[in-house]
Image: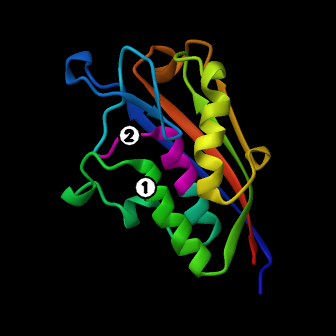
Amino acid sequence: MIGCRIGQGFDVHRFAQPEEGRPLMLMGCEIPHDQGLAGHSDADVMLHALMDALLGAAGLGDIGQHFPDTDVAYKGADSALLLERVMADLTSRGWQVVNADVCLIGERPKIGPHRQRMRERVAPLLGVATEGLNVKATTTEKLGFTGRGEGLAAQAVVLLQRR
């Protein structure tokens, strides 16, 4: 039986129109910003990438299979609650998170002032110490849709091990 598995995830969301009044949710935290992200759920691009990485490492598909955007039950859903469901499924299958690395891709907002709060919010959901969750960001040097400020992307990598 395989003892460790790596998974990677990627997600993209465009910015919502300001008049939509959506908050910007990143890593389960509301981040002060003039625009939130558009999506069926709360559009937490970082948690979506993280969930895809977790599901991929366990060989369980992707979040679209588990939480389809065609299901009204997930309209406006809190992605942190969806992450709890993913983690319950992984735990029931004998997996535990060793560490995770999540990267936001975009010109703005800057996440430095929010990084520790993000780690403290999500690490317990993963069952790891805050040191087991890295949160970072990068820009695309004003290139592409993220560089033009049209939306945000995120990547995540996780390592799972059998309990």
Q: Residue at x 19, y 57 (%)?
A: 72
The image quadrant of residue 19 is top left
Give the quadrant of the N terminus: bottom right
Give the vertical position of 108 relative to 123 (above or below): above
Give the vertical position of 8 relative to 58 (above or below): above
Mark 1 or 2, closer to the camera: 1
Write the start and end of the magenta stretch as one range: 41-51
> From where the camera sits, is residue 61 visible?
yes
Residue 32 place in picture, x, y as percent: 45, 18
Contact between labelled residues 2 and 1, with CB atoms less than 8 Å apart: no
The image quadrant of residue 43 is top left
Residue 43: which numbered mark, if any? 2
Residue 48 located within the stretch drawn in magenta: yes
Q: Which residue position is annotated with label 1?
A: 81
Q: Residue at x 25, y 20 (%)?
A: 17
User: From the viewer's perspective, is 33 left or right of 90?
Assistant: left
